[in-house]
Amino acid sequence: MRIEQLEYLQTVARLGSLRRAAEALHLSQPALSETVRNLERELGVDLLDRHRSGTRTSDAGRELLPHIAAVLEAVDRLRQAADHQHQVSRMVRLGTVHAATVPLLVPAVQDFRAAHPQTQVEVVTAQQVDIHRMLAEGSLDLGLVNYLTGDDLPPDLDSTQLLRGRPVVCLHPGSPLAAHSAVSTDALLREPLIVMRAGYVMHRYIHRLLRGRTPVFSYSTDGAEMGKLMVAEGLGATVLPDFSVIGDPLERHGVITWRPLADAEKDTEVVMAAERRRSGSSARAVHDLHDILLDRARLYRR
């Protein structure tokens, strides 16, 4: 059982319909319905009455609502107590996916260090699902994550867009592909391809781009930073958001370069977002680092 399942059911009961609850939670209605069904299966109780005319909380569901409210109130008190403890801490914990780090995060941390010389910054690299979990638990203060066009945003987190970019091919300057102004998918398949492991946004994008075709040879790695290092060593090419490559130290020093994808989906973008919990208060240092990330993103866009 997960806390968000209880929060979702409470929202359905408050608004009186799955459709209105899905809109309020920024979820698709099928996703919300499946989440509630999973909770029903776990509890062994039908929480909703489903009819052609609509969906309403069942009698059994209404009997359980006070208990659900009590659980959510207890969780909120726990978070408030943890927030109070964190107000006096001298560390900001930031989680980042691997494709959201060097060009934006490093200068932001440098700016933050100048403004908060006594506050440590702990940077945790992880997959997006783990960053969301740690933000919900309170073990992270901020998260940097990526989304593809059309992805749902988590309803329990505040998401602030930092950058929008296009997927590009990251290459060694000596690669034959670097002689072209753009790289087609067919040409990419003829070279060794460095792909992200399952669980990363760019893994999903590559799977969609290749449409079941396979390259002559491929490597699998945990994140963009290792992928770029492998490209720098001449092991192959990889596909990353342009903001993960342009301005990277390896690109600035001429050991990696990039080319646009000639046949990429025109409406597909990668969005980098800064995320934090909606509920609870944050230390001033967390707010400051969030604002510095926004400022650095504006500078990067220019």
Image: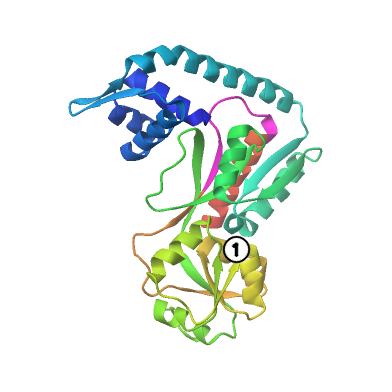
Foreground residue among 23 and 107: 23
Name the residue tied to disc 1: 224
Residue found at the very far front of the displayed protein: 44
Q: Is residue 252 above or below residue 2?
A: below
Question: What residue type is disc 1 on?
Answer: Ala
Q: Which element carries disc 1, helix, strand or loop?
A: helix
Magenta segment: 273-285
Q: Is residue 248 left or right of residue 65?
A: right
Image-quadrant location for residue 13:
top left
Magenta run includes residue 164: no
Residue 267 spot, x, y in % from top left: 34, 60
Image-quadrant location for residue 186:
bottom left
Residue found at the very far right of the displayed protein: 118
Q: Is residue 50 left or right of residue 117?
A: left
Residue 298 spot, x, y in % from top left: 54, 50
Q: Residues within 10 Å of mark 1 (few under 14, many from 20)?
A: many
Question: Is any atom of residue 166 visible in this view?
Answer: no
Magenta run includes residue 278: yes
- Residue that appears at 67% across and 67% down: 249
- Residue that appears at 37% across and 35% down: 32
Residue 250 spot, x, y in % from top left: 66, 70
Residue 185 spot, x, y in % from top left: 41, 76
Question: Is any atom of residue 37 visible in this view?
Answer: yes
- Residue that appears at 58% across and 21% down: 75
- Residue that appears at 43% across and 15% down: 65
